[in-house]
Amino acid sequence: MLGNFSYHNATKLYFGAEALQYLNDELPKYGKNVQLVYGGGSIKKNGIYDSIVKILNENEKTIIEDGGVMPNPTADKLREGARLAKTNNVDFILAVGGGSCCDYAKAVSVSAYCNDDPWEKYYIRFEDPDCKIIPVGCVLTMAGTGSEMNAGSVITNHEQKLKIGHVFGSEVMPKFSILNPEFTYSLPKYQMTAGIYDIFNHICEQYFSGEDDNTSDYIAEGLMKSLIKSSLTAVKDPENYEARSNIMWTATWALNTLISRGKKTDWMVHMIGQAVGAYTDATHGMTLAAVSLPYYRFVMPYGKKKFIRFAHNVWNINTEGMSEQAAAEAGLEAMEKWMRELGLVMRISDLGVDEDMIEGISDATILLDGGYKKLLREDVINILRESM
Ligand code: NZQ
Ligand code: ZN
């Protein structure tokens, strides 16, 4: 492994079908006023809300309700949540939901006592918090983003047509996260598969960079293989605990910084996907799925060796006797077949993108240079056109 790095993860995890009971161990560590963050109502339908409220009441907490967090949480909602936290003197924020609730809770935690506009400070100027930070905990109901064990927080600004992520320091990470795979059973198939592709792409974004022999890549291959196997089981049998638990655990390890150690990391599929999201408000994982193949086919000639290794080690393809080009392409073909089997959205036109948006989406795409080929604006336009 090349490079110097440190590794620290501040989030404690409780995993399994019995995990929720550990909320009783965690809540006494924090003050009385708990801001209960949740989304559009799924937790009320599946009963998770009632279980949580019961535990909060038993722990004599005052609940400050903060529901209605939308998928792809907005800057306006963030400002509202920050005001709510400050007005109610909130001691602790408990996010119950997917990545959107967890990201939003982190953003509120650094915004309640921020003297500036949080969107401008954290998402435009990328400054660090310099105010009191409210601790956050998470009860995860959707596997995908890895937000439960990282410091990332993505916020969308519809007026500015921007969707931007800020990776904060470890003081913003959830103090604990509760991961019960059964909580993901009620997810609609569309969300489940979007989450699965989000996980896969997080791994790809870190794997497809660098040329050195790196332990992180071997871990990444193991995670991808587990995810491929479990995803194919889960689409047929959504209540298969073994599959859903593997998916949930893989999601966490895909983006808790472990497999990025010693890696440059790419993240261009996410940059393009986020720009598509800013224009369409589409489901995060589907934006990634729809732009991935044109992107990887574009960068593949610049990182052929890794793509051949991907074909061989992840998809078990015997590449002996194949030309380099054919061997590298074989891995992407296997990935495409798997994506179609999951029923992922493969075109941005199916997510609401039309030709008139392409220039704007490419302008909203942040160009990073950790992958095998730094994209030019023109390249982004071509990839978007290929993705239509
Ligand atoms: O809002 P409710 O009613 O709860 O419904 C949600 C939502 O509609 C539903 N859902 C979640 N759990 C459910 C459920 N429905 C039934 N049963 C359950 N158990 O699923 C929908 C999507 O939820 P959401 O939280 O938006 O999905 P996800 O976890 O994919 O989070 C997406 C957000 O995370 C950001 C994305 O950009 C997006 O804004 N990301 C955060 C990252 C991070 N923190 O590191 C990295 C990712 O790359 C990503 O960018
Ligand atoms: Zn993602």
Image (tube, rainbow, N blue to C red):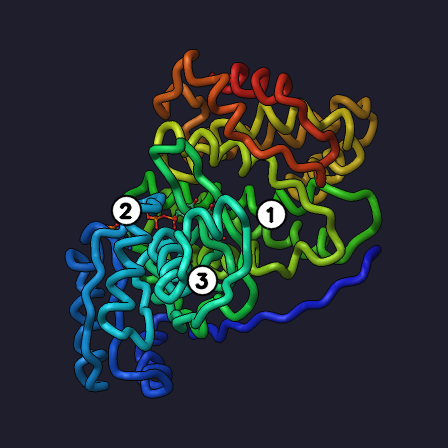
Q: Are marks 2 and 3 in contact (CB under 8 Å)?
A: no
Cα gap from disc 3 to disc 1, whole angstroms: 16 Å
- For marks 3 and 1 on the same chain, the one whose residue lies earlier in the sequence: 3
Residue 77 versus residue 53 in the image, above or below: above
Which x, y percent locates residue 46?
19, 59
Which x, y percent locates residue 180?
36, 66
Whether ligand 1 has any atom under 8 Å from the Cβ at mark 2 is answered as yes
Of badges 2 and 3, nearer the viewer stands 2
* Residue 241 shows up from this direction: no
Which x, y percent locates residue 206?
66, 47
Would residue 290 appear left or right of 212 to someone viewing this image?
left
Q: At 38% across and 70% down in the image, what residue appears? A: 137
Residue sitting nearer the eye, 63 or 261? 63
- For marks 2 and 1 on the same chain, the one whose residue lies earlier in the sequence: 2
Q: At 41% across and 28% down in the image, what residue appears? A: 345
**Residue type, mark 3 in image:** Glu
Question: Quadrant location of the N terminus?
Answer: bottom right
| Marker count (numbered) | 3
Q: At 56% across and 64% down in the image, what residue appears? A: 169
| Residue on which the image places disc 3 | 148
| Residue on which the image places disc 1 | 203
How many residues crowd mark 1 within 10 Å: few (<14), some (14–19), many (20+)?
Answer: many
The label shown at residue 188 is: none
Of badges 2 and 1, nearer the viewer stands 2
| Residue on which the image places disc 2 | 70
Residue 279 versus residue 58 in the image, above or below: above
Q: Secondary structure at mark 1?
A: helix
